[in-house]
Amino acid sequence: MAIPLKEERQQRILEIARDSRQVTVADLSNRFDVSEVTIRRDLRDLAEQGVLRRAHGGAVVAVPAPPEPPVVHRMGRAENCKECIGRAAAALVSDGDSVFIGSGSTTTHVARYLVERRDLTVVTNALNVATELATAEGVTVVVTGGMMRASELSLIGHITEQALREVRVEKVILGMQAIDLEAGMTNDYLPEVMTDRTTIQMASELIVVADHTKFGKVASAYIAPVERVTTVVTDEGIDPDKVAGLEALGIQVIIADASKAGAERKES
């Protein structure tokens, strides 16, 4: 049997994976009569395309991230979960810090727990985040310019990116639509990718806030590898294997305690 070319072989690997939901390196090596090293390269290429997700000894079909509704609709979904993540992430911010907070429903909850901070500077491209902090006496809010993405209430594009390059902060806090150990961090809106990439260059400390449903998912637009993250704040529903995978990359994982959600704000 003739050995198929690389592109043909990878297409057939994908078809096999979709039929059986998973593939192993050993089986594919025998099936195509090529070395396991070659098959691992094929699986790596397919994982980088976001169509497969690497697993021990092989790969599984990547689960696509569902399209996200507008941020104002997401605010009421899993609110207790997002609030506990917001509280835990806000605890990483101290008086006197300078931070960037990105757009999204979970990051809005982060902002709500920062209103009592003193001498805090918050840079944001999210109009809802800026609104949450607008009357906080101890917080200086810096809003980037740019084109508004109405569904996210966020500012994106080259004007935003230019403004972000002029600023340095100590911490960047971002929400993320899809996070996969192999495929990296992705979203489903291509025009926002360069804004996100510029954002994560603002500081060495990158804190990603995401509930457990965002992990193991892949969207269409690649942003950065997971290794770029320093801390993940998530909820108790996350798969322990995904926690172990993140920690193996040197990423701190904070599991937010849902029982504490709301307590700090109710006392203030």
Image: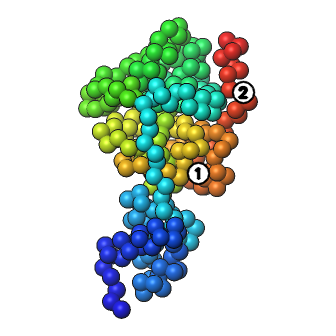
Q: Is mark 1 on a helix, strand or loop?
A: helix
Residue tagged 2: 260
Badge 1 density bin: few <14, some 14–19, many ≥20, Cα 10 Å: many
Asked whether the viewer can see residue 112, the reply is yes
Amino acid identity at mark 1? Leu
Residue under the point 58% across and 51% down? 246
**Residue 29 drawn above or below residue 180:** below
Q: Which residue ends up furthest to the bottom in the rendered image?
A: 1
Residue tagged 1: 246
Amino acid identity at mark 2? Lys
Q: What element carries label 2?
A: helix
**Residue 86 at x, y = what percent?**
59, 28
Residue under the point 36% across and 47% down? 221
**Based on the displayed image, in which of its 4 quarters is residue 256 positioned?**
top right
Badge 2 density bin: few <14, some 14–19, many ≥20, Cα 10 Å: few
Location of the N terminus (image quadrant): bottom left
